[in-house]
Amino acid sequence: MVRPEVIRKRLNKLDEYLQILRGLQKYSYEEFIRNAEHYGSAERFLHLSIEVLTDMGNHVIAELELGIVNSYSDVPAILAETNHIDDDLKNKWIRMIGFRNILIHDYLEIDRKIVYDVLQNYLADMEAVKRTFATFL
């Protein structure tokens, strides 16, 4: 059984992160890249948001015994296979995970233009995944 308190705690944390990210959306691209606190905060809170989504997905998969997770991208794939999310959301989530991997593993080569683009245009995708987990409350 999915434990609502586990989901609720993570949804609350995700809301906190998304609020910070929305605050960072107000900056122009030039202001964003000139200020290490802006782009550094965006990178970190985007990373944490993706971690929270994946953590909730792992919890649902484990508690409902939906399958075995061997990699981050298995989470949206299993949730799509079991009809918890549609293929469009699965693909968006897999792209988020790819972006997370860049933030974690390719940190020396992060393109701030891409970070800004994700910040400005893709928070709605995180909100869509968030709504999926809200149904477990």
Image (tube, rainbow, N blue to C red):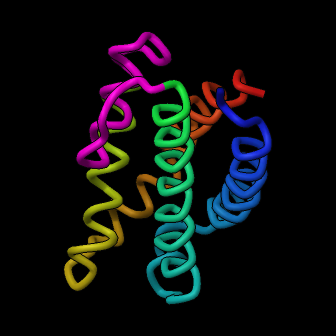
Which residues, given as a range, are shown in magenta? 65-88
| Number of marks present in the image shown | 0
| Quarter of the image where one finds residue 22 | bottom right
Give the left or right position of residue 137, taking residue 123 as reference: right
Q: Residue at x 57, y 79 (%)?
A: 38
Residue closest to the eye, 125 or 80: 80
Q: Quadrant of the N terminus?
A: top right
Q: Whole-percent x and y of residue 129?
A: 55, 32
Q: Residue at x 24, y 46 (%)?
A: 70
Q: Whole-percent x and y of residue 132?
A: 61, 25
Q: Is residue 77 magenta?
A: yes
Q: Quadrant of the C terminus?
A: top right
Q: Whole-percent x and y of residue 131?
A: 66, 28
Residue 26, relative to residue 68: is it above or below? below
Q: Give the residue at the far top of this rendering.
A: 83
Residue 91, relative to residue 19: is it above or below? above
Q: Is residue 134 magenta?
A: no
Residue closest to the eye, 8 or 49: 8
Give the left or right position of residue 112, taking residue 10 as reference: left
Q: Residue at x 21, y 75 (%)?
A: 106
